[in-house]
DNA sequence: GTCTATACTAAGATAGAC
DNA sequence: GTCTATCTTAGTATAGAC
C-alpha cells in the first residue's frame, strides 16, 4: 500500500500531455519537466534517463489496462456496445495513456508495442464470446481502432468522428451485423 | 514536363522510411541524408530547412492523393470493396506517404493534418453514393482507418489484421451491412 | 526529494570549396 | 548540385548543494 510519489505521477501526466499534443519530438526531458513544474534534475531523480521515463509510462498502461478489461467484460449494456462507446469517448486517463504509449510505439519502442499488443489481445478475448464469428470480431476491433485514430491519434482535427446520435446509429449497425 | 530532380525524391523516400520505421524523433536531417546517400549539405540544397522537408513530403501526398481518389471512384469491383482492400494492403508508395505524413501530423504539423483531412473528405465523397446511409459511410471510413493503424501505423507488430480469406469475409460483411 | 550548475553529444543551419 | 567544415542551440546526463 505504499502511496506512490505525487511528483512521479505529475511527471507522467506531463509526459502524456506533450506526447499527445505535440508528439514524441517535442517530449524532451526539459519540456516534460517544465510542464510538470519540476526541474530537470528533479525529473531525473524519479526517472534516471529518457528510457526510464518511457518505461514508466508503459508500466502505467499495463496497470490501467487490467482495470479496463475487467470493466468491458462486466458492462451491463454488453461488451460490444461498451467497448465501441468508450473507444469514441476519448479523454479518460486510460485513453490518454493508450494514445501516448502509441506515440512511443511509433517511435520504435518495443516494450510500448508489446504492451499495446497485449491490451488488444485482452480486448479480443473479452469481445469474442459476444459476436457471431471471426469477421465480426475483426470488425469490432478495427472499428474501435478507427474511432481512436480519429478521436485522438491524428490530433482531433481530421475526423468527422461520429458522436451522439450518429455514434449510436453506428453502434446499432455493428451490433446487428455481428450479434451472435 | 520538367523532370523532377532525382536526388530530391531520394531524400523524400529516405525521409518516409525513417518516419515509418523509427518515428519522427529519429528522422533527423543527418539520418535522412545518410539514408538517402547524400550529405547534410546536399540535402539542405534541396530542402533549405527541416520545415521545408516536411512541406515537401506533404506536397508529395497531395499529388498522389488526386490519383488515388480517381482510382477509387473508377474501380470496377465497386468503390467500397476497392477502398477497404487497398486500406489493408499497405506497402504501396501512396500508403507509405500517408503513413509518414500521419507521423508529421502527430508531431503537430498543421499542413500535414490539413492534407490528411482533405484526403479523407475526398474519400468520403467517393464512397457516399455507394452506401445506404451516414452510419454506413462512417463504418466504412473508420474501418479503413482501423486497417491502416494496424497494418502500418503501429509498426506492423500488434495487429491480427485480417488478410486473405479473413479480409474477404470482413469486406463481404461490411458490404452487406452497408449496401444501398 | 528537489534544486542549480555544468559537461557532453546531437540537431539544425550556414559558408565556402569543388 | 554536392561536399566538408564550422557555428549555435537544444537534449541528455552527472555532480553536488540544500
Image (spheres, coloured by chain):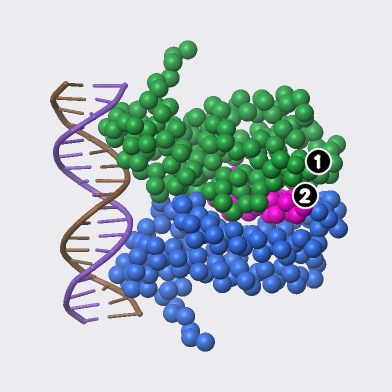
Chain colours: A green, B blue, C purple, D brown
Residue drawn at (42%, 35%) of the image: A14
- Classify A26 as above or below B74: above
Quadrant of the rendering where the C terminus of chain B is positioned: bottom right
Residue B135: which numbered mark, if any?
Answer: 2
Residue drawn at (77%, 30%) of the image: A78
Q: Chain of mark 2?
A: B
Crowding around mark 2 (Cα neighbors within 10 Å: few <14, some 14 to 19, many 20+) is many
Look at the image and tell me whether residue A81 can be seen. yes
Residue A166 pos. (x, y %)? 74, 45
Q: CA distance from mark 1 to mark 2?
A: 9 Å
Secondary element under disc 1, as helix, strand or loop, is helix
Residue drawn at (67%, 68%) of the image: B69
Residue drawn at (47%, 45%) of the image: A21
Q: Chain of mark 1?
A: A
Residue A148 pos. (x, y %)? 62, 44
Q: Are marks 1 and 2 in contact (CB under 8 Å)?
A: yes
Q: Which residue is mark 1?
A: A172
Residue A101 pos. (x, y %)? 51, 39
Look at the image and tell me whether residue B103 can be seen. no
Verify whether residue A13 appears in magenta.
Answer: no
Magenta-tinted stretch: B134-163
| Furthest residue in direction bottom, as rendered | B1
Of residues A45 and B22, the one drawn nearer to the viewer in this rendering: A45
Q: Is residue D15 left or right of residue A109?
A: left
Residue A151: which numbered mark, if any?
Answer: none
Of residues C12 and A105, the one drawn nearer to the viewer in this rendering: C12
Verify whether residue B136 appears in magenta.
Answer: yes
Q: Is residue B58 left or right of residue B83?
A: left
Of residues B120 and A164, the one drawn nearer to the viewer in this rendering: A164
Secondary element under disc 2, as helix, strand or loop, is helix
Amino acid at each position: 500500500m505504499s502511496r506512490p510519489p505525487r511528483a512521479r505521477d505529475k511527471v507522467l501526466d506531463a509526459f502524456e500531455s506533450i506526447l499527445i499534443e505535440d508528439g514524441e519530438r517535442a517530449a524532451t526531458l526539459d519540456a516534460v519537466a517544465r510542464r510538470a513544474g519540476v526541474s530537470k534534475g528533479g525529473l531525473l531523480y524519479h526517472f534516471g534517463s529518457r528510457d526510464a521515463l518511457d518505461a514508466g509510462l508503459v508500466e502505467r498502461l499495463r496497470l490501467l489496462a487490467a482495470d479496463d478489461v475487467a470493466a468491458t467484460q462486466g458492462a451491463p449494456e454488453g461488451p460490444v456496445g461498451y467497448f465501441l462507446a468508450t473507444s469514441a469517448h476519448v479523454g479518460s486517463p486510460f485513453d490518454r495513456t493508450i494514445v501516448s504509449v502509441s506515440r512511443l510505439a511509433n517511435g520504435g519502442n518495443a516494450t510500448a508495442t508489446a504492451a499495446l499488443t497485449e491490451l488488444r489481445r485482452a480486448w479480443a478475448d473479452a469481445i469474442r464470446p459476444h459476436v457471431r464469428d471471426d469477421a465480426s470480431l475483426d470488425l469490432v476491433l478495427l472499428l474501435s481502432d478507427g474511432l481512436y485514430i480519429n478521436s485522438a491519434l491524428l490530433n482531433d482535427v481530421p475526423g468527422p468522428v461520429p458522436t451522439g446520435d450518429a455514434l449510436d446509429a453506428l453502434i446499432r449497425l455493428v451490433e446487428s451485423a455481428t450479434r451472435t
